[in-house]
Image (spheres, grey):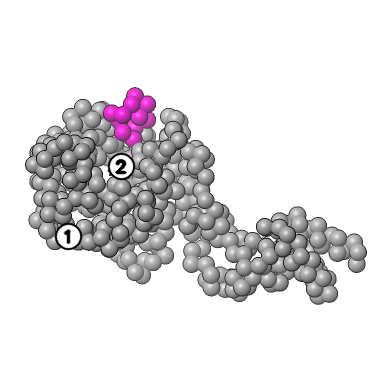
């Protein structure tokens, strides 16, 4: 079984979600919960970005002992110095430095040649390695970079001291097969690749961030970056809870595992959602309110007979207390009867026949039937009996 390291960037890329601004104590609260969840690395912020970011990264590095705390730095000495000052008291300090490598970023953003980008990346990785025991280097917009050039710059930064190489799909452009193939290409064409850990970092612009992260693992990645609930720039980042649960449920296929305590997922998701004020859509995979809810009669009947008929993830696995059969117009007699029993009602077969007809009539007019609706129906039936 391959070990996959989980790199959480909820507090950095996640906080870059439009409209999100976490304060100092909210960041500390999230950091403690991420440690409880068992993330291997947490990116606590971008120390050079603001005094507030610097202070929260420093405090998180000082307090968190069971995850490695990192901070982001552009390929400039000032950013690396700020990150060192913020992170040096941490248990396992590491730096995350990046520079863009794609033609579009080189030409329009950096106004640098290929050679200048290599030179800057190498110089800054060397500079950072004099301080930090672990330096992660990222090729921003890697998925839109010429493959031979990407391989060349990756080899150069490994020689300069980088220990982790991150290959971001910065704008969420790659397809799973393309993204997995970048990792395969690097494994085959970078001479020193065995000395480092390869990492994926996916954005969800085309809704492929989770699939791309899993494709990267198949291609040779041993680290996956993402955020809780998939929050982040634009359409967000890969949702870590989805990647981790996919690896667990399809362990037979991926032959890989994380060290996350999966039953802390719901608690972590709720906390991040509450503090960022970003609501989780009900149909969101793994942690949405409907992820374990079965509405149609055929599905409810199947689940009552044997859960695995329509439920591939047990809610308890991710810390959700139990599955819920949502009663509505598609529900069958079996689920209706089960719920009445749970509500401690004894009804005869004859009462049941009448109640089920009334239930269907009412459900036709309402989106969802609540327990109060059922209680009212039964009490009325008993009263007129
Ligand atoms: O998406 C991206 O390229 C990033 C880098 C800074 C790693 O977030
Ligand atoms: Zn990103």
Q: Is residue 46 magenta?
A: yes
User: Residue 190 or 283: which is nearer the viewer?
Assistant: 283
Label ID, residue 170: none
Residue numbers of the magenta segment: 45-58
Q: CA distance from mark 1 to mark 2?
A: 29 Å
The reply to whether residue 191 is visible in this rendering is: yes
Looking at the image, residue 165 lies above or below residue 352? above
| Disc 1 target residue | 185
Q: Is mark 2 within 8 Å of ligand 1?
A: no
In contact (CB < 8 Å): disc 1 and disc 2: no
**Is residue 92 shown left or right of residue 366?**
left
Tag in front: 1 or 2: 1
Residue at the right extreme, as displayed: 384
Q: Where's residue 309, x and y in %?
A: 53, 73
Looking at the image, residue 95 lies above or below residue 372? above
User: Residue 53 or 28: which is nearer the viewer?
Assistant: 53
Secondary structure of the residue carrying tag 2 is strand
| Disc 2 target residue | 68
Q: Residue drawn at (25%, 35%), measured in percent from left and top? A: 73
Q: Where's residue 55, x and y in %?
A: 35, 27
Q: Is residue 161 magenta?
A: no
Point out the quarter of the image occupied by ligand 1. top left
């Amino acid at each position: 079984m391959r070990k996959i390291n989980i790199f959480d960037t909820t507090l950095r890329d996640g906080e870059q979600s439009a409209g999100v601004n976490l304060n100092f104590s909210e960041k500390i609260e999230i950091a403690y919960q991420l440690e409880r969840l068992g993330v291997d690395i947490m990116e606590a912020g971008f120390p050079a970005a603001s005094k507030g970011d610097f202070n929260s990264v420093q405090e998180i590095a000082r307090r968190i002992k069971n995850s490695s705390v990192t901070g982001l730095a552009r390929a400039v000495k000032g950013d690396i110095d700020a990150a060192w000052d913020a992170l040096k008291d941490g248990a396992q300090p590491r730096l995350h430095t990046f520079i863009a490598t794609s033609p579009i970023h080189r030409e329009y953003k950096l106004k640098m040649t290929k050679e200048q980008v290599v030179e800057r990346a190498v110089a800054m990785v060397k500079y950072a390695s004099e301080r930090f025991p672990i330096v992660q280097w990222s090729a921003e917009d890697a998925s839109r970079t010429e493959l031979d050039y990407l391989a060349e710059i990756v080899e150069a930064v490994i020689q300069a001291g980088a220990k982790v190489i991150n290959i971001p799909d910065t704008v969420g452009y790659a397809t799973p097969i393309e993204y997995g193939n970048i990792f395969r290409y690097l494994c085959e064409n970078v001479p020193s690749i065995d000395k480092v850990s390869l990492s994926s970092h996916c954005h969800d612009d085309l809704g492929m961030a989770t699939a791309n992260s899993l494709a990267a693992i198949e291609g040779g990645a041993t680290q996956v970056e993402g955020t809780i609930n998939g929050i982040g720039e634009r359409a967000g980042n890969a949702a870590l809870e989805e990647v981790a649960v996919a690896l667990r449920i399809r362990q037979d296929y991926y032959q890989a595992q994380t060290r996350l305590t999966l039953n802390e997922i719901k608690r972590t998701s709720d906390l991040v959602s509450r503090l960022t004020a970003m609501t989780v859509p009900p149909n969101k995979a793994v942690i949405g309110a409907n992820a374990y809810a079965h509405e149609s009669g055929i599905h409810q009947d199947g689940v009552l007979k044997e859960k695995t008929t329509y439920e591939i993830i047990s809610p308890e696995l991710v810390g959700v207390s139990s599955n819920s059969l949502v009663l509505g117009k598609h529900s069958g007699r079996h689920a209706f009867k089960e719920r009445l029993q749970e509500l401690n009602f004894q009804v005869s077969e004859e009462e049941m026949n009448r109640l089920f007809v009334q239930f269907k009539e009412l459900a036709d007019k309402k989106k969802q039937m609540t327990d109060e609706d059922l209680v009212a129906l039964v009490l009325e039936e008993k009263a007129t009996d």
